[in-house]
Image: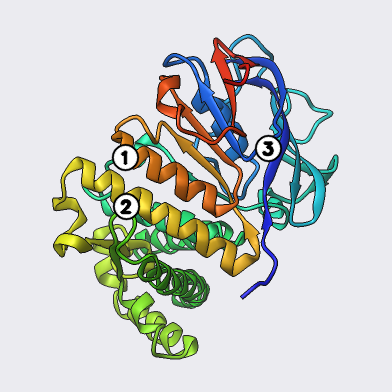
Amino acid sequence: MPGVMIPSRVRRLSLTHFRNYRAATFETRSNMIVLVGPNGAGKTNCLEAISLLSPGRGLRRATRDDIADNTGDGSWAVSAEMQGALGLATLGTGIDAPGNEAAPSGRRCRIDREPVASAAAFGDHLRMVWLTPSMDGLFTGPASDRRRFLDRLVLAIDSEHSGRVSALERSLRSRNRLLEMRHHDDLWCEAIERKTAELAVAVAAMRAQTVTRLTAALEARGGGSSFPAASIHLDGWMENALLTEPATVVEDRYREILRASRPRDAAAGRTLEGPHLTDLEVIYAPKNMPAKEASTGEQKALLIGLVLAHARLVAEMTGIIPLLLLDEVVAHLDPDRRGALFGELAGLGAQVWMSGADPAAFANLSAGSETFRVDSGRITREPPT
């Protein structure tokens, strides 16, 4: 376990042609940043911009072409001067205008103005955890939502995880296409299945490790928190097998399953076994019932407790205190739970970005917090109260 914890902090953020921001730059000085303003002003857009400075596709999972504002040439950019695990650094990402033959296509990522291969390199400097309103239906929605949430938890610890998940998805698609052929090449199919099994075990192993450690972190929170305890489990044979069996044994078994299930998978048009179907089961511990059966308020509190425990786990496993992005997180909390949340956030030692329409909801934040008014793509600092 790392000794010294290093916080991730954004000191200066610049947005260019990003959603409803033509050009915006502002500096922060504290650990508690609050963005207030009416709905549609651009608060979530600002948080999304920050989220793109981490591995993955950001908190909205938007395609790169959906991000540019409608007044520019199709290009967009996000840049942040920050203090992180490797000291001061400038992280940047964006795309050039479509049709610009002199510039490389695709999303570009830079660290200290030098190009890097992908956003995974940002993980050397900072870690990030977020909670958005779209996650409120996590426990009642499809398994794919919980699987994506789980992979985001893993990604905050292992910045290469999303690359492995994407590679596994591509490998599965290649196998499915090959099986569509009436007379497919068995040797080629075996080669694809060998690669698929290797990637599947790598993805499943990191999921299993993360859930095991997160379970311990949730137990360590105890029952004294205002946010209820949760019990979490993985509904996936491979992840559970890897807790007790060598990875090579599990990989060989999955390769045999893929070989034996070719006719069935060909008829179904998809692969019917593997970690791409894993589900995350969450139990509401105070009532020992599935989280999907808890009330809306209980589910919200449970989700906040999960995210807080995960943030602590990220710090313990990586030595980097993650930056937290909490979009509209206090909107449906009563005053007591809001106060409890602010207290737990202060105890993390993290830089926290929160958004909300009602400034009064943040009245009990510490005196060192900063509030910024967001209005139609403009960000201005509010005077301290």
The local crowd at label 3, few if under 14, some if 14 to 19, many if 20 or more residues have their Cα within 10 Å, is some
- State the CA–CA distance, disc 1 to disc 3: 43 Å
Considering the numbered disc 3 on the image, is that residue within a helix, a strand or a loop? loop
Considering the numbered disc 1 on the image, is that residue within a helix, a strand or a loop? helix
When asked about the image quadrant of residue 308, the answer is bottom left
Q: Position of residue 180 (x, y in %)?
A: 35, 59
The image shows residue 236, relative to residue 363, as above or below, that is: below
Q: Which residue is mark 1?
A: 336
Residue at horizontal 33 percent and vertical 50 percent from the top: 303
Q: Nearer the viewer, residue 305 or 349?
A: 349
As drawn, the label of residue 107 is 3
State which mark lies toward you, 2 or 3. 2
The image shows residue 296, relative to residue 180, as above or below, that is: above
Residue at horizontal 45 percent and vertical 32 percent from the top: 364
Three-letter amino acid code of the residue under disc 1: Asp
Residue 151 shows in this picture: no
The local crowd at label 1, few if under 14, some if 14 to 19, many if 20 or more residues have their Cα within 10 Å, is few
Q: Which residue is mark 2?
A: 227
Residue 249 shows in this picture: yes
Q: Nearer the viewer, residue 156 or 171?
A: 156
Q: Position of residue 26 (x, y in %)?
A: 71, 23
Considering the numbered disc 2 on the image, is that residue within a helix, a strand or a loop? loop
